[in-house]
Amino acid sequence: MERRVRCACGGDPRCELCNGTKTYGYTPGPRGWLPFACPTCAGTGKLGAEACPTCRGEGQVDPADPPVNGFLDVVWKVLFGA
């Protein structure tokens, strides 16, 4: 079953994962939520001279670690887990 995950790019139109929509679809495999190579920078972590906005310069996207969505999201994760 496909889930919608927040993208780290924050709506950047250069992002090839979400195309600037701030969320992308991900279907967990039999081993769960696994990181995958960033489609925007092809796993290098850089776009030209700056860090890739999609993977935050890491070269891979981890769908199990999406960016926080405000203060209430932080409190929810502290109290109830991710």
Image (tube, rainbow, N blue to C red):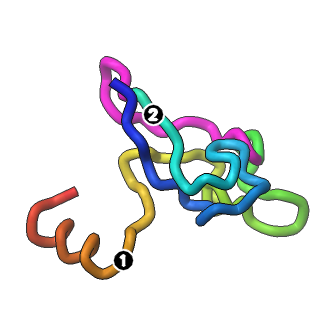
Q: At 37% across and 36% down in the image, what residue appears?
A: 3
Q: Which residues are magenta?
A: 28-40
**Does residue 23 appear left or right of residue 72 in this picture?**
right
Instruction: Please report whichever mark, 2 or 1, sits nearer to the chain's N-terminal start.
Output: 2
Question: Magenta-highlighted stretch: main secondary structure?
Answer: loop
Q: Which residue is depicted at the point 41% across and 27% down?
A: 27
According to the picture, the residue beneath numbered tag 1 turns out to be 70
Placement of the N terminus among the 4 image quadrants: top left
56, above or below 40, in the image:
below
> On the picture, is 45 further left or further right than 25?
right
Q: Secondary structure at mark 1?
A: loop
Neighbour tally class for label 1: few under 14, some 14-19, many 20 plus, Cα within 10 Å:
few
At mark 2, the secondary structure is strand
Apparent side of residue 30 relative to residue 22 in the rendered image (left or right): left
Amino acid found under the numbered disc labelled 2: Tyr
Direction left: furthest residue: 79
Residue type at tag 1: Gly
Labels in figure, total: 2
Side of 79 where 6 appears, left or right: right
